[in-house]
Image: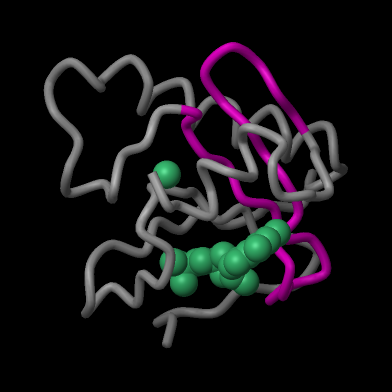
């Protein structure tokens, strides 16, 4: 599987790791869009949120809960935003499901 995030989760490409457990890996985004910008991914390759199946429900919940725990551990007590870019119009550029955890500044709406 020629997937950059699979390789990061496997430790084959270096990253600034924030969290790892049996199913989830999290690391700092290489091109941060906020003072705190962490990516949370499943170790299992899932091309996007649109590719999730009923059997992935527990994994999706784990990803969201991990985002909340990382936000707490990184002092995002004033708030943060979790984003899942999905498909071409969603602006997804890496085709392995990832949650963006963004914090450390005021967020605005609507996003770009
Ligand atoms: P997307 O555009 O798919 O929503 O998000 C992909 C994210 O992955 C971008 O924010 C981009 O900066 C980040 N990214 C792409 N390649 C790498 C990499 O090799 N290492 C890390 N740490 N982040 C990456
Ligand atoms: Zn992958």
For the point 79% across and 49% down, which residue is it? 14
Quarter of the image holding residue 77? top right
Q: Quadrant of the N terminus?
A: top left
Work out whether residue 36 or residue 48 is closer to the camera in this orientation and state it: 48
Quarter of the image where ligand 1 sits: bottom right
The x and y percentages for residue 37 are: 71, 60
Q: Quadrant of the C terminus?
A: bottom left
Q: How many marks?
A: 0
Work out whether residue 18 or residue 109 is closer to the camera in this orientation and state it: 18
The chosen color scheme is: one colour
Work out whether residue 38 or residue 45 is closer to the camera in this orientation and state it: 45
Magenta stretch containing residue 35, yes or no?
A: yes
Q: Is residue 112 above or below residue 59?
A: below
Q: Is residue 104 above or below residue 75?
A: below
What stretch of residues is rendered in magenta?
A: 19-43
Magenta stretch containing residue 81, yes or no?
A: no
The x and y percentages for residue 78 are: 76, 52
Judge left or right: residue 41 versus residue 13: left
Q: Is residue 42 above or below residue 94?
A: above
Quarter of the image holding residue 44? top left
Q: Residue extending furthest left?
A: 54
The x and y percentages for residue 82 are: 51, 53
Quarter of the image holding residue 59? top left
The x and y percentages for residue 65 are: 53, 25
Q: Residue extending furthest bottom?
A: 112
For the point 51% across and 41% down, which residue is it? 6
For the point 19% across and 35% down, which residue is it? 52
For the point 67% across and 38% down, which residue is it? 26
Judge left or right: residue 76 versus residue 41: right
Judge left or right: residue 92 versus residue 87: right
């Amino acid at each position: 599987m020629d997937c950059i995030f699979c390789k990061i989760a496997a430790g084959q490409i270096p990253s600034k790791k924030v969290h790892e457990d049996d199913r989830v890996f999290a690391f700092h985004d290489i091109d941060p869009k906020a003072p705190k910008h962490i990516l949370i991914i499943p170790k299992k390759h899932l091309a996007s949120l649109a590719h999730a199946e009923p059997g992935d429900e527990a994994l999706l919940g784990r990803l969201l809960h991990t985002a909340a725990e990382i936000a707490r551990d990184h002092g995002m007590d004033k708030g943060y935003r979790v984003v899942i870019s999905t498909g071409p119009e969603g602006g997804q550029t890496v085709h392995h499901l990832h949650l963006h955890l963004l914090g450390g500044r005021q967020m605005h709406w609507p996003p770009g």
